Structures are given as C-alpha cells and as structure tokens.
Amino acid sequence: MLHQYDRRARSQRARRYARRSYAPAHAGGLLRTIPARVRIFSGIQPTGRKHLGNYLGAIRQYVEGQDRGDPAIYCIVDLHATSVAYDPRALPDYVYDTTAMLLAAGLEPERCVLFRQSDVREHTELCWLLSAVAAYGDLTRMHQFKDKSERDRELVRTSLFLYPVLMVADVLAYRAHEVPVGEDQRQHVELMRDIALRFNATFGETLVVPEHRIPALGARIMDLQQPDRKMSTTASEQRGLVYIDDEQRAIHKKLKSAVTDSGSEVRRAPDKPGVSNLIDVLAAVRGAAPETIEEEFAGGGYGAFKTAVGEEVAELLRPVRERYAELRPDEAALEQALAAGAQRARAIASHTLADVRTAMGIGPRASSLH
Ligand code: AQP
C-alpha cells in the first residue's frame, strides 16, 4: 500500500493521537486524572524465569492495563536479549517461558496485543531512524548501560549502548501514551520523551510523547540478600530473588533467610534496608500502605514477620505458578498467540513508520508515486 504524504494531515493526526482521551496519569507522584482509554505499551525481556520484582513492578500493571488500553500492547523483547552474552539455542525457549508466564499472570490475547519483538521488523528500522535524534551524550549517561558495561568488560556490545534507542522505538512505534514499568526504567522513559520531542521539533509533529506509569507500591523490589541493590535477573544470586514459579517451600525459605538488620523493630528506615524492603514487598502484595504493615507487626520481631511475608508472597504467586505449568508445554499454542499478536502489532507500527519515513525524507517522494 502506498502512503500519501500530506504534512498537514500528518500533524493533525499526531495532535489527535496525543489528545485522544488522554490525560497524564501521574503528576508529582499523585494520580491527577483517571485516563479513559489510553494506548499502553511495555516490553519485557525473555530472560527465562521472571522474578517477584518483575511481577510486582511490571506484570501486575500489564494485567490491569488490559481494561484501559486502547489497546494494551505487550512485547517480549528478544532483540534486547542479544545485547549481553546469551545462549542462542535457549533464546526461543525463553521467549515461550516469558509468554507462558505473562498468560499465566492474567494476560489474555483477546484483551491485549502480545507479541515477539523480532516478528515486527518496524522496530529495528525505527531504531535506526530515531538514532538521528538520539544524543550520544544522553546514551552514555544511561544507568543500565553503565552498570551492565561495568559488569561485563570483556565485550561491551554496541547493542548494549543502543539498547535504549531500540526501547524508544518499541514504544514510539505504537504512539503509546503510557508505559508501565518499574522504577529502574524511569530514565529510559525520560529518554523516550526527549527523543519524541526532538523528533517532532526537527521533522514536524509525528510522534506521541509517552508518560511512564510507575506503581506506587512495588516499583523497586530489592535483592533479599543485598537489599541495597535491586532484585535483578542478571545481578542477583539465587537466594537473593524469588522466582514467580518458585515452589511454595522455596519461597518460604528465601524469605525466612532474607537479610535483615540488627535490632528487631519492623519499621522502615534508611539504616534498615532489609526490613524496609520486606515491608514494601508485603505492602505491594496486599495493596496496603506500608504504615499499616508496620503497625500490624510492631513488637512481634523479625521471625514472625518474615514468615508472614513468605506465606503471603507464596500464596500470591501460587495460582500463577500452577497456571504456568499448564500453559508452558503447549508451544504451538504459545507460538500461535504470538503470531496473531505480531500481525496486530505490525498493523499499527507500519503506519507510524511510514509517517516517520516520510517526515524524514526517506524513500520516494509521494508525488512521484502517482
Ligand atoms: N527489582 C525490581 N522491582 C520492580 N520492578 C522491576 N523490574 C525489573 N526489576 C524490578 C521491572 O520489570 C520489567 C521487566 O524487566 P526486564 O525486561 O528488564 O526483565 P529482567 O531482565 O528480568 O529484569 P531485571 O531483573 O531488571 O534484569 P537485569 O537487572 O538483569 O537487567 C521492567 O518494567 C522493570 O522495570
């Protein structure tokens, strides 16, 4: 299909996308307006087993977003996985693991668009085009790049450096308004906004400037053994993280042996990162204010508190683990769901890419195509 170039129509369309039923979800950390139907996009890495931080910080928001999203679009970002050392034979399995995990957590292919990043080639082309408005200096300041390049000095891949631009392309390709993520992705969403604004200022109104949606509770779950660091797939050791599909007993044990601090008071304080983290975990699990947790466990000591956290986390994750065990073996069904999602995703992304190409003067002049 040929795409007509009409600068005025394009900028009207961009304004319409930006306006449509959308109001910023967060203002100064407070919910200012409840948006009606917004376009939601988020990506998740196929890193095999996902952890409690991923669940509380992101996956639970994905599930909730299905009812507000117009549509809600979720992407398994397999191309991002190649930015660090990885096993090519295992990657397809990891994609199925993550797909089955998201479905087990409550995503329904009829209520959202769920797909594999590499199936929609618009992402990579848009990544290159957006590199033209991505400042090199901004990319050198990305925390994730600094952390991961420090950890693996043997080969710091260019793809690790460009990772944030691909992430920007992932979101901007869908003209998404809202990006549900954990706290660690705040900087990347800021970059998206900068790049969208710079693109629009340089080439004309084309892209929507997205907002992050970082949950009030559970946005930064810390490592159980090193509570000054976030729970992380690549940096945490086994005892430091709870996997979503961990057995009940393993979860109880990990929480029981979580590092706590000297003293016995169940209260949050800067010098009590271990207990503070567990309070935040329980608050996020229950959807309750951390203060109510402190009141409930005041004077009870760490032992009883850690047992309670272990039991409630295990109970929260149990249905997801059970459903995951049912869904994971049927790879044909998982593949079918991803393929159907990719078709829907491509239908949206191809329009944005056509507009971006036109705005940038890439490809034939529209008038010469008649
Ligand atoms: N500790 C966390 N607390 C809250 N949210 C978190 N997220 C990640 N860690 C925490 C959020 O989970 C979503 C998916 O992240 P990802 O695709 O980066 O998945 P991952 O690679 O398994 O997550 P890690 O642990 O962050 O991996 P590393 O550190 O190895 O790169 C995102 O929205 C993220 O914010």
Image (spheres, rainbow, N blue to C red):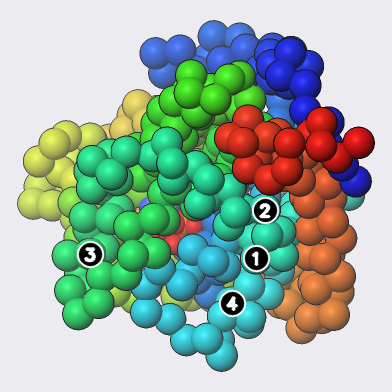
Q: Nearer the viewer, residue 50 or 16?
A: 16
Q: Is residue 356 above or below residue 251?
A: above
Sequence-first tag of 3 and 1: 1
Q: Residue at x 28, y 55 (%)?
A: 145
Numbered mark located on residue 149 in the image: 3
203 horizontally vs 304: left or right: right
Amino acid beneath label 2: Glu
Q: Residue at x 22, y 58 (%)?
A: 147
Q: Nearer the viewer, residue 43 or 167?
A: 167
Mark 3 and 1 residues: CB-CB less than 8 Å, in contact?
Answer: no
Q: Which residue is mark 2?
A: 122
Amino acid beneath label 4: Tyr
Quarter of the image where the C terminus is located = top right
Q: Which residue is mark 4?
A: 94
Q: Residue furthest top?
A: 32
Q: Position of residue 332 (x, y in %)?
A: 85, 80
Q: What is the quadrant of residue 83 in the picture?
A: bottom left
* Front tag of 3 and 4: 3
Numbered mark located on residue 118 in the image: 1
Sequence-first tag of 2 and 3: 2
Q: CA distance from mark 2 to mark 1?
A: 9 Å
Q: Position of residue 215 (x, y in %)?
A: 49, 33
Mark 2 and 4 residues: CB-CB less than 8 Å, in contact?
Answer: no
45 horizontally vs 292: left or right: right
